[in-house]
Image (cartoon, rainbow, N blue to C red):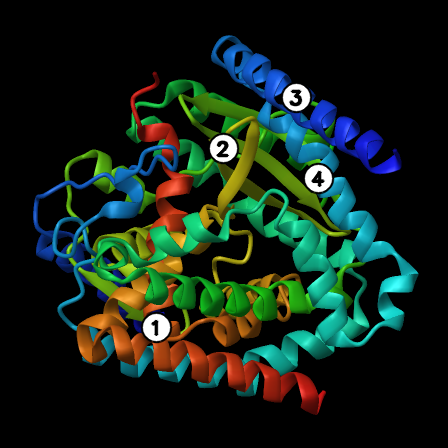
Amino acid sequence: MNQKKTMRLFLNVLFVVLVTVCSFDNTVWAVDFLDDASYEEQAGAKKAYDPIEPLNRVVFTFNDKMFIWVLNPVATGYSKVLPADIRGCFRNFFYNLAEPVRSLNCLLQGRFRDSGLTLSRFLINTTCGVFGFADPASKEFSIAPVYATLGETLSVWGLGDGFYLVVPFLGPSTLRDFAGTVGDSLAVASYYPWSSDDVNSITLRGADSINTISLHLGEYEELKSLSFDPYVSFRDGYFQMRSKNREHLKPSK
Amino acid sequence: MRSTHVLTQCFFIVFITVISTIFLSSKAVFAAPDPTEQLRPFLQKVTDLLADPELKTFSKDEQSRRILIVVREHFDFTEMSKRVLGEQWRELSNKEQTNFEDLFTQLLQYAYIGKIDEYSGQKVEFLRQRIRGQRAEVQTQLVDKARSIPVSYIMLLRGDKWMAYDVVVEGVSLIRNYMEQFKEIQKKDGYTGLVKQIEEKIAQIEKDKKRT
């Protein structure tokens, strides 16, 4: 019990520290491919800020080995045991569990409509979708999933990225977004039915990752084999993908 | 007698072409062709070719050569090479530009077109398009068994043909991603170093292909 409390405290302190360390400059990574500027960005102008690149590269290599030697073989074996549609159901289940946190983040970002939509998704999928294993909200009610994270909320509030950070096991992130991820997982864990047991939470978190990897087998290796410097390629990919996910933040034309 | 007949025929064809070009280009000002309507039959053609069992009977090199011919109809490799190099492109001589274009095309050919075996009847769904001036973005979805992957084609109007110069998969632009990497390489080893690395990469892919 005591150990658990220290763990919680540690995570909370980590969260606060990460948030305070981030500087207050807010760059929105808006990209419009029809605009030539998106291809002509000059070095230094909007480049990914990566002051701890040597350290990041070490963690990147660690994650890479971890993936190749542990996660990928496990996920491959797992994918042979369970068919893709059942694994898809598990993905839905984990995704659905985090919907209330997403809804809250929308609220904090002032996206009231999205917040309501996410909450309705959660209610529909939890009831009609049998605890979230199916996704009738997208399929029958045409409510598309909404992207919202605490990292994004912090950015809306004016918190800068800090710097690019490769997190062990989790992969590409930035200081701010990693703080967001920590915050989001703490929030989800607080109402998990099995939240009373930290070991359970961690096991399930692991199961979620393995399940996700099993649905994307071969993609990592392929991306890696096509790139000249995987580290740079994944860093750029991370920022591009994130700006795509946060497109709704751009003022509508 | 016969030769004059052929000559008149030739003249007639040229005449028709000139007239229709003038007519079409003046018309294009008023109504640019629809990018989705051009991309749809083109992608159909590509997927048909990939699904064609006859294709598998050829050697690997012949397969990718055949696909490249079709792909070139709506992919502008010059524009891709130009964008991936950024400012550096303007500093190259014509010969260097052609050389780079060949290399980059070869890289894309090996990297992407080489993955023919992985095609298993995925369908392409068209979502929406945006047009701004001579540019267009056509958003599609590649529907697979367990999930669907958003793929956008960024195109440029050349004459009356929309030519793709970038492919954006799940929000990640292929050209921008290579651009970022090429920039780092050039910063360290210069343009010659970059060319050398691309050559090595192609050689390596070729070697891997032979092994499997």
Local packing at callout 1 (Cα closer than 10 Å; few below 14, some 14-19, many 20+) is some
- For disc 4, the marked residue is B42
Q: Residue at x 13, y 49 (%)?
A: A45
Q: Residue at x 56, y 78 (%)?
A: A71
Decide: is A85 above or below A52. Answer: above
Q: Residue at x 10, y 53 (%)?
A: A20
Image mark for residue A231: 1
- For disc 2, the marked residue is B158
Proximity of marks 4 and 3: CB atoms separated by less than 8 Å: no
B203 or B20, which is in the foreground? Answer: B20
Decide: is B37 above or below A76. Answer: above
Q: Nearer the viewer, mark 2 or mark 3?
A: 3
Q: Amino acid at mark 1?
A: Tyr
Proximity of marks 2 and 1: CB atoms separated by less than 8 Å: no
Label 1, secondary structure: give it. Answer: helix
Q: CA distance from mark 4 to mark 1?
A: 34 Å
- For disc 3, the marked residue is B15
Q: Is residue A71 visible?
A: yes
Q: Quadrant of residue B22?
A: top right
Q: Amino acid at mark 4?
A: Phe
